[in-house]
Amino acid sequence: MIRLVEAAGFRLVAKSEVNANPRDTADHPNGVWTLPPRLRLPEGDDGEKYRAIGESDRMTLKFEKR
């Protein structure tokens, strides 16, 4: 992600793990949509496992135009 944005003429200024979720293993049956708030669950699943994980792991990046 960083290389793509830098190739478009931006410079990485800062990054943060403020939105990270270490409980998100990123291997869910319906991808990120399996997790809240969407909860697109496999048939017969009540969703408690996915509610316990919470929202998806995210990155926060700050760029400035060169």
Image (cartoon, helix red, strand yellow):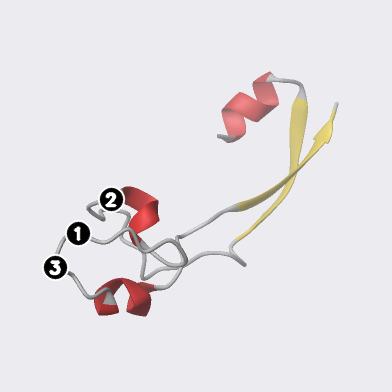
Which residue is disc 2 drawn over? Answer: 30
> Residue 3 is drawn in which quadrant?
top right
Residue 1, given in percent of the width and then of the height, sits at 55, 34
Residue 54, given in percent of the width and then of the height, sits at 42, 73
Q: Earlier in the sequence, mark 1 or mark 2?
A: 2
Q: Amino acid at mark 1?
A: Pro
> Residue 56 is drawn in which quadrant?
bottom left
* Neighbours of disc 2 within 10 Å: few (<14), some (14-19), many (20+): few
* Neighbours of disc 1 within 10 Å: few (<14), some (14-19), many (20+): few
Q: Amino acid at mark 2?
A: Asn
Asked whether the residues under the numbered discs 1 and 3 touch, taking CB atoms below 8 Å apart as contact, a structural biologist would say: yes
Residue situated in front as seen by the camera: 53 or 41? 41
Asked whether the residues under the numbered discs 1 and 2 touch, taking CB atoms below 8 Å apart as contact, a structural biologist would say: yes
Tell me the SS state at disc 1: loop
Left or right: 39 with respect to 55? left
| Dot label at residue 44 | 3
Vertical placement of residue 30 versus 51, above or below: above
Residue situated in front as seen by the camera: 24 or 10? 24
Q: Earlier in the sequence, mark 3 or mark 2?
A: 2
Q: Which residue occupies 36% across, 71% down? A: 23
Q: Amino acid at mark 3?
A: Gly
Which residue is disc 1 drawn over? Answer: 42
Q: Mark 3 or mark 2: which is in front? A: 3
Residue 8, given in percent of the width and then of the height, sits at 70, 20
Tell me the SS state at disc 2: loop
Q: State the CA–CA distance, disc 1 to disc 2.
A: 8 Å
Tell me the SS state at disc 3: loop
Left or right: 58 with respect to 32? right
Q: State the CA–CA distance, disc 3 to disc 2.
A: 14 Å
